[in-house]
Amino acid sequence: MWGFVDCTRYFLSVGVPKVVLHHASMVADSSERVGLLIPPGQGKSTIIRLLAGVEKPDSGTVLRDEGGWPLGYSGSFQGELTGEQNVRNIALMVGLDPDEYALWCADFSELGEAFFYPVKLYSGSMRGRLAFAASLGIPATTYLVDDKLSVGDEQFRAKCENALARKLRDTGLILVASNPRTTQEVCERHGVVIRGKIIECDSHEEAEELFVRTFREGGGSEDIADEELASFDLD
Amino acid sequence: MSLGADTTFGGGRRPGFTASLVAHIDIILALAARDFRGRFGQNSWSYLWAYLAPLAWIAATYLGFYIFSRTVPVYTDTITFIISGLIPYASFRYTVTALARVNNGIRGLLIFPQVRHEHGIAAVALLEFANIFVVFAVVAAANYLLFGNGELDNVPQFVAGVSLAWGLGASYGYLFSALGRYRPGLQRLGAALLRPTFFISGVFFTANELPDNLLQYFSWNPLLHAIEVARDGMLFHYQSRVASPLYVVAWIAVLALAGAVVSASREA
């Protein structure tokens, strides 16, 4: 089970409190594919970090399962280590066979010789490829995604999307994105984060409309009734 | 290719005690390897420099002895005397300094469900434990090759003294690392509190030469006891009248327990 129960999280931005979540609630099953829309700079990464357990809420409870895994997360790479050493290191941390896992990552990332170079020499795209290979090779029950479902050139993006689609047959997903198109294809439940509340929508179209009306057209947020801001699925 | 058969998470499968212990050891070793590479880089000169730096520290202390015309209070040469105090002190101080980096170093890994703050602490502390004996080997070899001096009276006792200083550094570092997760300023406070330790811990004097009215206060310092244990073990002609290993162990236990309580309250 994933989600938030009456969760509040804010941080100070230039001395002014910036609210990410305000008494927000949401519950999702580990196998569900949930898409949350939130504008850029409003706390996508914070929500993922809360779900991953790296950050604590200021109040409330975060519901987490053990099998959650951040998709395409490159923050764990040590620049001095080669791509191979990094993924072997991850394999040891998560209890996988380092040989098998390194082989899989080398094959999927298509980095060639660069797989054996220090990661500090990688371009952003190369880091992204390795990060996606590393996370798609992990047997997660739920992927936690911060905006990006794929990286790299067109061919590699297609490869990522195909691999993810296969994974999502029996794996859940919590995708926090700023672009409604990102959540359209892969998510079965949709929500929008407005003024720190998570509002559930019945369909992607409804979520997109609410998101656009609220954030893109510069108005609408004041029109949202408090009862509409009530968070979803706690029963 | 199928992955996942060996995984210990995701399917709700609970590993047995041995499997769980092995998993923890794997994580600690992986983090230690990562920290080692990160600190020393891919360049072998970096390794060498890290172990040669203490020689500069010893030279500076020797210069202090020379400038203040300080004579060695034990029947041994000046360099050997300095080494007998500096190695356990370095064991303590290096460990505290290394553990101060754990919060930043492990932040990117805590997103993995298996990795805990304590894994990072254990990995870095163990690395420092190994490091200090390499440092001692380098320093002792330099002392022997350059000056023809060197003493090691009671190896187990010397190792025990260095280990106690390391344990003290590890537990102190753990407590302030845990406090630093609440407020980073608390970690800086932990480092600031240590500044006088070089001057009050018996690095360049012995507890035996202190007057009783000073010793009654200085002997509260657990690091003084650890250094005295190590010096007693290293020097042929020194027997400490105050060294109490159990006193140091009690401090280590209290600091580690306090660190665990702070860390657990943070996780809750």
Image (spheres, coloured by chain):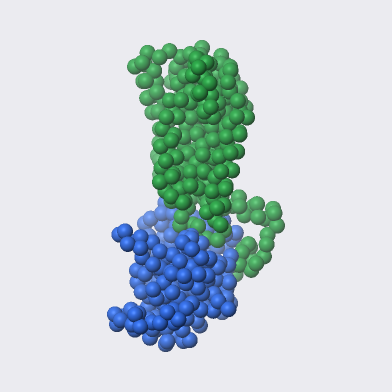
Question: What residue sits 54% from the left and 74% below the top?
Answer: A27
Instruction: Determine whether A219 is above or below A137 in the image.
Output: below
Q: Is residue B51 visible?
A: no
Residue B79 location, quadrant: top left
Q: Residue at x 55, y 68 (%)?
A: A63
Query: In the depicted view, which residue is nearer to us: B255 or A85?
Result: B255
Q: Position of residue B105 (x, y in %)?
A: 45, 51
Residue at the far front: name it: A226
Residue nearest the observer in this picture, B5 or B60: B60
Q: Residue at x 56, y 43 (%)?
A: B258
Residue B118 vs residue A224, the one in the foreground: A224
Rendered hue of chain A is blue
Which color is chain B depicted in?
A: green
Nearest the viewer among B132 and A24 is A24
Residue A33 image offset from top left, x and y in percent = 52, 78
Left or right of B257: which side holds B148? left
Q: Residue at x 41, y 54 (%)?
A: A79
Q: Image quadrant for the N terminus of chain B?
A: bottom right
Q: Position of residue A88 (x, y in %)?
A: 53, 57
Q: Position of residue A114 (x, y in %)?
A: 41, 60
In the figure, residue B251 lies in which quadrant?
top right
Asked where in the image residue B240 lies, by quadrant, the reply is: top right
Residue A16 can be seen in this image: yes
